[in-house]
Image (cartoon, helix red, strand yellow):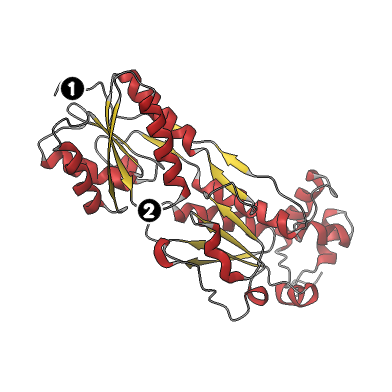
Amino acid sequence: MPATSRPTSKDVAHEAGVSQSTVSLVLGGKWTGRVSPATARSVHDAAERLGYRPNQAARSLRLGTTRTVMLVVPTLTAPFFGPVYTGAVRVAARHGFGVVAYVWPDDAGPADSPFAAPHEAIDGILASSMAVDALAGFRGTPAVMLDSDPSGSVPTVGFDVEDGMRAVVAHLSGLGHRRVGHVAAGVDQWTFRARARALTEGIRALPGGSLSRATCAIEVGSAKAAAARLLTSPDPPTVLVCDDDLIAAGAYKAARALGLEVPSDLSVTGFDDVLLATALEPELTTVAVPAEEMGARGMETLLELLDGRRPPRRVLPGVLKVRGSTAAPAHR
């Protein structure tokens, strides 16, 4: 092959010692069950060595697809959604797909498509932390829901958030906490309803357990005000369980404004384990949910759906990360 020519799929096939049809299957993301993983790796390695890049425009015209997926999220400011996008892009790139992000806020109702004809602009949708009826305007475009209600007919990839919250309750009860305050996200999403349900059931099962709740926006100032309401009540909690790590930062500020030290006077927990969790002092006890893995698994699920398969519901585990923000309750 001359040094100035662009490598072709035939060149990749020769380099990997396989047929051109095998190269098409592998680089088109349709090799599972048809080609061995070792062969797929050989094809990818050969393409990388040669610097081969498929002509996606020609391929799209030939197949009638755009090789583009839209990731719909309620906000780009929350630190959770960046890793979701990163995971989705990582898998999409291996299969020759691109990912575009589209913001549709929680309270905006059904999403309006940014495209005049969605089916001509995108092949599928990943929607994170949204209700499935928010996608009504996309007229049947194949979709996978992330961190959303798994009870519907749309394939889902999510976290076992209820089990994560149960781990928080077990940790706190083991430390001796019984008066629990819940600084809850004032957002009507399945994930927050599931967290509240698991927390309520867990505290109800504790002998002498009591639970108070205040809602807030997922924003430090709003969370600080909600936490202060709980901490200035007649029988204040010894621990604040927060729906989100950003909310936990607001709880820290409320505690310090009231002259309380974390954790000697007040324990605090979060949820998600974003970078903020280890930037706080003391570092935050929180439930680590693998956001990047969710984006990756979501993209894999969508590719299965586009390939005509019926992907199962996927549930990823959360892991409790015990750090310096929790301790045995002070006698107050």
Horizontal and vertical percent for residue 43? 78, 54
Secondary structure under tag 1 reads: loop
Residue 203 shown left or right of residue 42 in the figure: left
Q: Which numbered tag is attached to residue 330? A: 1
In the drawing, what numbered circle is on residue 187? 2
- Quadrant including the N terminus: bottom right
Q: Amino acid at mark 2?
A: Val
Which residue appears at 47% of the width and 36% of the height? 162
- What amino acid is found at the position of numbered circle 1 in the picture? Ala
Which of the image's four quarters has the C terminus? top left
Quarter occupied by residue 320: top left
**Residue 192's x, y, as percent?**
42, 45
The residue at the far right in this view is: 19
Answer with the quarter of the image where residue 270 lies.
Answer: top left
The image position of residue 266, as x and y in percent, is: 20, 30
First reached walking from the N terminus: tag 1 or tag 2: 2
- Of 270 and 52, which appears nearest the observer? 270
Residue 179 image position (x, y, % from top left): 25, 27
| Relative horizontal placement of residue 225, taking residue 148 as reference (left or right) | left
CA separation in Å, label 1 and label 2: 32 Å
The answer to whether residue 75 is visible is: no
* Vertical comparison of 317 with 36: above or below: above
Q: In front: mark 1 or mark 2? A: 2
